[in-house]
Image: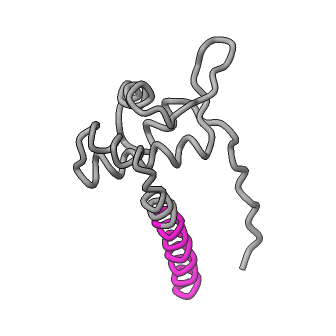
Amino acid sequence: MPYKEKEIEKKYHSIGEVATMFKVAPSLIRYWEGEFDIIHPKKDKKGNRRYTKDDIQKIRYIYHLVKEKGYTLQGAQDVIKQGKEQGFDKVATIQKLQELKDFLINIRDEFNAQSNS
């Protein structure tokens, strides 16, 4: 198998990059920032938001509650305030499993492509 360079993982992501990850408008991310006190992106000198991996995990949890589970904003806030961190952990675990699945599918596809050559 050919050598693959390890991907460099970014420390900070712009609001546009985060919005693209979730296929939502940047304005929705800004809105959620005002509605949910668990999101605290760093801001640079120009005031541009810089999201860490932890911020993105929190946004993923909010996205899961609101967009996938159908909670209202108030309902999602209540779930978060009740300390249901298990839900946060489940969403993070699901994300890791999806990444692993994608990785394994990629390996399988590369193997099949080499076998057919």
Give, as a single range, the part of the protein colored magenta.
Answer: 94-117
> Residue, x 64% and y 11% (percent of image)?
46
Q: Quadrant of residue 62?
A: top left
Instruction: Pick the residue in front: 101 or 89.
Output: 89
21 inside magenta stretch: no
Q: What residue appears at the point 26 percent right and 54 percent down from the top-left corner?
A: 69
Residue 99 placement (x, y as % from top left): 52, 65
Q: Position of residue 90 (x, y in %)?
A: 45, 64
Residue at left 27%, top 37%?
74
Q: Is residue 112 above or below residue 17?
A: below
Q: Quadrant of residue 52?
A: top right
Dominant secondary structure of the magenta stretch? helix
The residue located at (43%, 36%) in the rendering is 19
The quarter of the rendered structure image containing the N terminus is bottom right
Residue nearer the viewer, 37 or 64: 37
Which image quarter is the C terminus in?
A: bottom right
Return the residue found at the far bottom. Answer: 115
Q: Position of residue 84 (x, y in %)?
A: 43, 56
Q: Is residue 75 left or right of residue 63?
A: left
Q: How is the image coloured?
A: one colour
Q: Residue 92: image x %, image y %?
A: 51, 60
